[in-house]
Image (cartoon, helix red, strand yellow):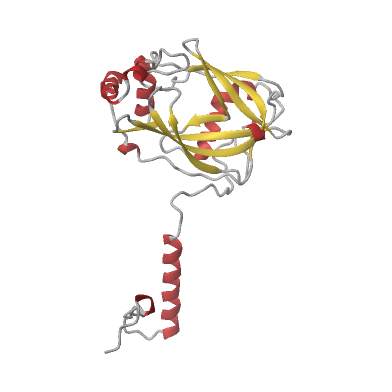
Amino acid sequence: MPHPPPPHHRHAKPLHFHKPATSLPDFIYAALSLAFLFSTTATSSLPKSIALIFPQSTRNKLLRNPNMSISNPNPNPNSRRRFSNPQALSEWLRPRMPTDSFAAWGVQPGTKNVHNLWLELSEGETSLADSIPPVRTVQVVTVRILDDRNRVLVESHQELSDGTIRYRGRPLSEKMKPGETVEAAVDRAIREELGSILYKGLSELEDQNESVKIIPDSYSEKVEERVSASYPGLPACYVLHTVAARIDCLPDEEFCTEEDEEYEDSSERNVADKAVSVKRHYWKWVDSDKV
């Protein structure tokens, strides 16, 4: 008896489509079948993460770039862990973290406290995995602001509400809110952290909406895992959504900006008043190859 051919030589059984009785010519059915197959293949090959493809956008007037697009990378807010108050969060964290590390929160200079983390969770900016230690996941937008000498604007340090200093050494960045697009997060980050000097430097005759220009095709996404500087001992997974931009009217030398009340829109004023907030940002220009 002859041996069957190896698997890769076997012919797949053809699919048979039963068409209803009709007077339409066969070539029309063939065309429809091909269209169906191509549309199915194209849909199944779409990437899970859609990068910015830069169509015209008019929703955020601050961003004047015809190539900015939207993307919604945030996880489902309903899947986030909830805690009724900071005390409940503290009791959940304590047995899951090194005692010395947790005790340093809000005490060690430059760190935040459990009230900050609770606000992040309640506002959907952060999620926590139920592990030992827990892992904090944050979606972050990063804006690499370039000047005409190809230098990058870097935040050297921050002055916090408790009088301590937190060192940064990174471009402008901001935690994203649930359901927020990358475009909207860039808009908000620039307004909150640079607005005090950006709009002060523009004359009344200048159009403020033309001051920020996103560089086309500059979007990138990557994941970084490291221990959080704000919460010692708490591992963090940062999903970084980065764009490059040019902004007019920024000082050529080092400068400082002030931020409005960080939690002014929070409905939890009794908690926000106990959290550590950022009061001032200190900026400097750094050669792009050193960032």
Residue 150, percent from left and from top: 70, 35
- Residue 44 visible in this rendered orientation of the protein: yes
**Where 41 falls versus 65 (above or below)?**
below
8 vs 122: above or below: below
Residue lying at 43% horizontally and 14% vertically, measured from the top left: 108
Number of marks in the rendered image: 0
> Which residue in the rendered view is the most extreme toward the right?
149
Residue 14, percent from left and from top: 35, 80
Quadrant containing the N terminus in the rendered view:
bottom left
* Residue 212 in view in this figure: no
Position of 91 with respect to 27 (left or right) is left
Q: Is residue 92 left or right of residue 283?
A: left
Where, by quadrant of the figure, is residue 80 drawn? top left
Nearer to the camera, 207 or 278: 278
State the image coordinates of residue 142 (x, y, percent, origin top left): 54, 34
Q: Residue at x 57, y 34 (%)?
A: 143
Residue 135: image quadrant is top left
Measured as percent of width and height from the top left, residue 189 is found at: 53, 29
Q: Residue furthest bottom?
A: 1
In-front residue for pair 43/168: 168
Instruction: Work out whether 33 lies above or below 97.
Output: below
Q: Classify the position of the C terminus by image quarter.
A: top right
Q: Tell me if 77 is positioned left or right of 39 in this view.
A: left
